Amino acid sequence: MNETSNLTRQQLDTLATELDAIYDDVPSTCCANSGECCSLTAAEMDEGWATMFPLYKAEYARIADHVRRTFDAERSAGLLSVTDERPQRCPFLGENNGCTIYPVRPLICRTYAVMNPATLAEAVERHRDELPQQWLQQFVQRESSMVCPRVMVTQPEKLLRHAYNVITGSYERAMERLSSDLELVTKERRKLIQPLIAGRSWPLRWTWGGYNALCLTPVEWVREQLRKYWRRSQLNDLD
Ligand code: SF4
């Protein structure tokens, strides 16, 4: 076990390999590093948008491990103590607008703006007769909200497979499979937390700050603040 989680080094290494296998289907991209998709405008804050969301539990465990192993003690402690559920600027956005955890960034950041109107139309046409119309509509609606003209796909040969995975929910299922049985904290901490979150299961998707609040805050904070924090949460994916 390590300080970040209840997971052993071997479990974390296996998790990293499994996550990378899922990410490998996503075409790589390059962009102008404007940082616009990693921070929110005032209007987007009002509308309830969030950066780096949804973050799967398995991804959180991997990123937290990466933070501890990669950054110096001060930076690591700062990132692991973030509890803002929906910060206006992603805590991993660097001063030059680059992503400071690029190799382990979550699925949502990898898939953002991969599709554009032309590739969306092509994917819909390809699957029109074989996949449910509703899936195709949801795919177009969701991906259209993430189109960015500054993003360029550098692995276009992966686009068809990627589109199929998004339409059929295959990425989501893989992430849920990796996340569902993952135990992030010790039994003692779970016992302390469970009554404060009304006995609910832990979210499979949440935010960096949300998971930090559950996993890494001091016991006194959990006792005094967690119930209120949980009730006010807008993004934990409870059924
Ligand atoms: S994790 Fe990286 S790519 Fe994702 S929102 Fe944060 S800075 Fe941007």
Image (tube, rainbow, N blue to C red):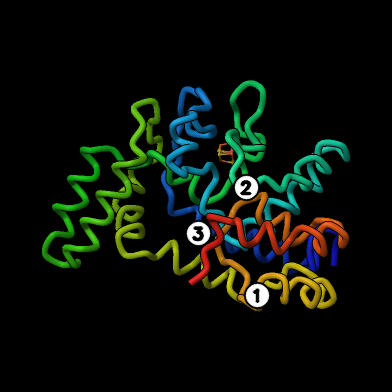
Query: Which residue is located at x 44 percent, y 31 percent?
Result: 43
Between marks 2 and 3, how big is the CA–CA gap? Answer: 12 Å
* Quadrant hosting residue 166: bottom left
Q: Amino acid at mark 1?
A: Ala
Nearer-N-terminus badge (3/1): 3
- Residue 39, how many percent across, how many down? 54, 32
- Residue 237, how many percent across, how many down? 52, 64
Badge nearest the viewer, 3 or 1: 1
Label 2 belongs to which residue? 104
On the rendered structure, is 164 left or right of 89? left
- Residue 56, how many percent across, how many down? 57, 59
On the rendered structure, is 237 left or right of 115? right
Q: Residues within 10 Å of mark 3 (few under 14, many from 20)?
A: some
Between marks 1 and 2, how big is the CA–CA gap? Answer: 32 Å
- Which residue is more in the foreground, 94 or 152? 94
Label 1 belongs to which residue? 198
